[in-house]
Amino acid sequence: MKLLTSTLWIAQLLVACLLGWAAYVKLAKPIADLAAMWPWAGEVSAVFVRFTGVIDLLGAAGLVLPAALRIQPRLTPIAAIGIIILMVCASVFHVLRGEGASIGFNIGVIAIAAFIAWGRFIKAPIQ
């Protein structure tokens, strides 16, 4: 159980760091710079790009803070499920734009978030 708990924390921190980085980039960088990295960012409204940054930030916080602070730790697996939904939506968005080859990242995050949700709901809930 100790190994599972440690692995879950590593997974939570990994996904939180990925989402935190994405949030920082989407919220702090000019849209033109984002469009050079991600073409879609230049083809949608700036409000949408910033909104996705806020959602990424909330997902990162939801994976770590409730568990780390032991305040409503049951929110951690719920955040993981929210991240799964977010990544499914992002995958659909990219497929509809003809960018299906770029959803590998999304699928990887879905797999890790599913592991976190399973582990924190079923196997190693935070006490």
Image (cartoon, rainbow, N blue to C red):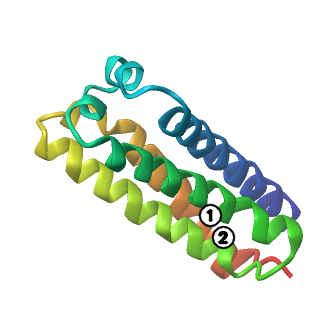
The N terminus: image quadrant:
bottom right
The residue under label 1 is which amino acid type? Answer: Ile
Identity of the residue drawn at 39% across and 65% down: 85
Q: Position of residue 88 (x, y in %)?
A: 32, 58
Q: Quadrant of residue 74?
A: bottom right
The residue under label 2 is which amino acid type? Answer: Gly
In the rendered image of this protein, does residue 119 appear above or below residue 45?
below
Q: Residue 116's mark?
A: 1
In the rendered image of this protein, does residue 36 appear above or below residue 54?
above
Q: How many marks?
A: 2
The C terminus: image quadrant:
bottom right
- Pointer 2: what residue? 119
Q: Position of residue 28 (x, y in %)?
A: 55, 33
Identity of the residue drawn at 34% across and 17% down: 36
Identity of the residue drawn at 30% across and 33% down: 41
Q: Residue 26's mark?
A: none
Mark 2 and mark 1 in contact (Cβ < 8 Å)? Answer: yes
Left or right of 15 on screen, residue 81: left
Comparing 33 with 10, the one in front is 33
Q: Position of residue 81 (x, y in %)?
A: 50, 70
Identity of the residue drawn at 59% across and 37% down: 24
Q: Position of residue 37 (x, y in %)?
A: 38, 20
Q: Secondary structure at mark 1?
A: helix
Q: Secondary structure at mark 2?
A: helix
Q: CA distance from mark 1 to mark 2?
A: 5 Å
In the rendered image of this protein, does residue 95 appear above or below residue 3?
above
Left or right of 40 on screen, residue 105: right
